[in-house]
Amino acid sequence: MKSVPLRALGWPQIKPIPLAIAGVLAAILPMILNSSYWVGVCTLALIWMVLNQSWNLVLGYSGIWNFGQLAIYAIGGYAAALVSLHTGLPWPIALVVGGFAATLVSLVLAIPSVRLRGIYVSLLTFGFSEVVRLLVIADKTGITGGTFGLSGFDGYGLQSMEPQARYRLIYWIALAFVIITLVAMYFIVRSPLGTGLMALRDNPSLAAARGVSPIKYQLLSFGISGFFAGIAGGLYAFTYGVVSPSLMGLGQMTLLVTMMVVGGLGTLTGPLIGTAIITLVQAELQNWPEIRLILLGLVLLAIVVLMPRGVVPLLAGRMGRLNSWMSAGESKESKPTATSTKT
Amino acid sequence: MNAILQTLVSTIVQGSILALISIGMTLVYGTLRVLNMAQGVMVMVGGFAAYTVVDRTGVSPWISIAVAAAVTFLLGVLTYYMAVKPLLGRPGVDFEMTAFITTFAVATIVQNIILMIYGPRQKPFDPLWPGGINITSEVSITYHSMIMAVLAVGALVALGLFLSRSRYGLAITAVAQNLDAARLMGIPARRVYVVTMGIAAALAGIAGVLLAPLYFVYPNAGDLPLLQALIVVIFAGLGSVKGTIYASYIIGFLSSAVAIFWSSAFALPVLYIVILVVLVVRPNGIAGKPQEARL
Amino acid sequence: MVQVSTTSTPLLRARGVVKRYGGLAAVDGVDFDVFEGETFGIAGPNGAGKTTLFDVVTGITSATDGVIEFAGEPIQDATVHDICHRGISRTFQLPSVFDSQTALANVLVGAQFGQPRSWFTAGRTDADMLDRAKRELIFVGLAKKASALGGPLPVYDKKRLMIASALATQPRMLFLDEPFGGLSPSEVDELMVLLSKVKERGITIVLIEHVMRALMALSDRVLIMNQGKTLFQGSPADVLRDEEVVRVYLGRRGDREEGAPDA
């Protein structure tokens, strides 16, 4: 059995040095950035990282074309905001309530989705997202606040703090959730659940013939993904003190899908790197909103056409080739293996 | 009674326009397996092309229909070369998924270019024929609505004749039915793709001009038509031309009825709930084939 | 040869199995029994309904009519994964693996999901399962390619990988759809050795095969199908003597010693 190392599974490996560097950099970033504008931009990027990681579980790892994630994210945000507004419970509880509300909606959306064929799923979920948005806009009961959304809730309850310290603290809260989500995704990908989901994505008939129940595990992936999306929504609500229908919508969807596609779907670090890159580009172009979206569309188009697997697998592939070239003397089989293409 | 009559009139007008827009999506899906998310933008661009021509040169709105069709035809062809052709025959990549995303990207690009040029304001567009007649004291029908229905149905009939009689039309039909067999018979599949994308876009462009007097011309004018067309094509089962026409009128009826008897804000949500139920019962739409596997 | 007593209850019992696609009956009333420990071969011209029969038994498609019993329980309406959990595992005619996963990860799917498990254990990685996956990968001779991705593997490796992941589900019965198709003569020899080792483990095998040499050597009993119906059922030795089989399927004797009659 020694002849088959565990590494051969091709699971994502922890690379301690880059991970430590990235972690420290992320932690001290708000100290380096002296402008509260940039700390705010980075906080939003972190919230999007939580959302994109959750989306990636369904879209990338499970291969289910779910384009309804923004509605689930918004529902999490609204639920957390409502709890905060009406009950005065502490924010972590409101956040978790938002997460569970989102899980529930995600599961409801999953029931038709797992029974349908690819393109129909994208139509259904895309439409679902729009319907949720339109319903919120049309809402006259005052529960959701209609077009203007909800505001006036406590959020993290840090209003008494000095602004700069507050922005930093909010940044670190978001960072903590990015790390929690990343750790969760890491364990999911390496667990039987991850194996089963990727098997169903790669070859549904073979996966079923090997005993993977499509409905059971895909529902589970929707549930988990919904929970983290809901948390992301709650983070947004508490960071900005407002939730509105603008959380959803086509422009927002283009932005987030571009992030995931740029980074690489179905990789652990892809959503993180893609989000970082696109957020930076977006922030630089903030004064030209039309050009911003045109550019976003062009980037999305170019990435899908030129490198459909995203930046991360491409870079990892280069690294893998370098590694295998360096170790070519040891082993005759120097083809790039999965160990090196998944990061 | 008046409300019922109103619904009936509205069904015919809405259904015909919906058919015009969604038949293009179905045609493109049938031949290329591309769900064209840029179809809504074509509706919007058709409106803008017509508005620009009328505004600048003062020609009759009737002529602007032809201009809009030509402009959107070219834009459809351009979409093919930008978003679809580079993906064809590429191994290891889910073509339907990537094409869904690239056409969506094209839609974003085009919409924001228009936004940059024209700004977000709604622009008025004159009806093709002002005025109308009163059927009863409360139910009236504008001449423009009648023209909309007549032109839409006319375009559909013309499309039907084109598909069943002309050389190119038959080639499109053949490719949609069986790509390999069509290739073996010497049909140049890629040229068929280009023409199909162009025609589909032109149909949406015409619809855009017809809708312009009702909903104005503005950069987001294509969003609602896209969502409605998506409902129609899911309901019909992608790729089924006949199913799409039936579905257009059914969806047209439902959305008119909800709008008139309840509120227009709930028309789309109600339709999506209907679709949800349809898909759970028949996962491939009303005209699609049932699934085989016991997965 | 494993001695098979035909009086005992069969492990798999199929009666009047029919599969219709519209007006066409791909499988048209087939009866057969497979007994524990034996190797049951299925052959016949293209379009005879062999693969459809496999698909019906393993749940990939539903039977229009008929009864299929496994270990005494009806399975004709069971789902694909449920049939796998009951102990029937299969391979596919076209080499099909999980393209983006390594060879070892491919086999692990079978090891982790081959037995029934509830969803809340989906986060637990069991060392036993990993060991089983490694064992089966070594068993089929792919240990050296454990970390290679499934997609780019050559046909022979993919076929062995499919068998390994099927074995990792711990099946009582293994369905092999043309395991020898597209292989070189030396690969056919190697695979025959491998399959007889599978047989020695006490796993019941049902295989579709065009390569008559392999079919005859491995099978204890043979079913020849034609146009969805049973043409012949009996011992491999009798097949070659059956005039109808020779006329319909094998052609003139001596014509096709080796390889596929119509592949």
Image (cartoon, coloured by chain):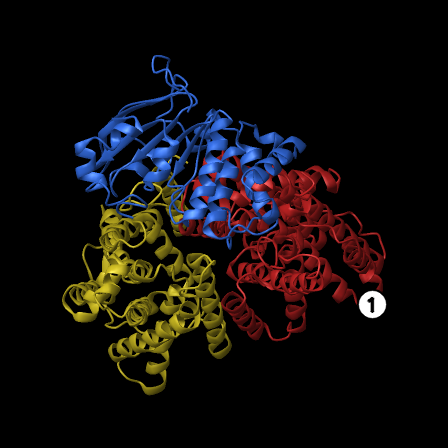
Chain colours: A red, B yellow, C blue
Quadrant for residue C117, please give it.
Answer: top right
At label 1, which amino acid type do we have?
Asn
State the image coordinates of residue A182 (x, y, percent, origin top left).
69, 48
State the image coordinates of residue A276 (x, y, percent, origin top left).
68, 63
Q: Which residue in the rendered view is the most extreme toward the bottom?
A: B57
The residue at 45%/67% (across/down) is B107
Depth order, front residue of B266/A46? A46
Residue B167 vertical placement versus A256 (above, below): below
Kindly tell me whether residue A2 is visible in this rendering: yes
State the image coordinates of residue C130 (x, y, percent, origin top left).
63, 36
The residue at 23%/56% (across/down) is B12
**Label 1: chain?**
A
Quadrant for residue C230, please give it.
Answer: top left
Left/right placement of residue A208 relative to residue B157 reads right
Q: Residues within 10 Å of mark 1 (few under 14, many from 20)?
A: few
State the image coordinates of residue A309 (x, y, percent, origin top left).
55, 61
Q: Which residue in the rendered view is the most extreme toward the left?
A: B165
Q: Which residue in the rendered view is the most extreme toward the top?
A: C7
Kindly tell me whether residue A144 is visible in this rendering: no
The residue at 73%/50% (across/down) is A14
Depth order, front residue of C250/A234? C250
Determine the secondary structure under disc 1. loop
Quadrant for residue B207, please give it.
Answer: bottom left
Report which residue position mark 1 lands on. Answer: A34
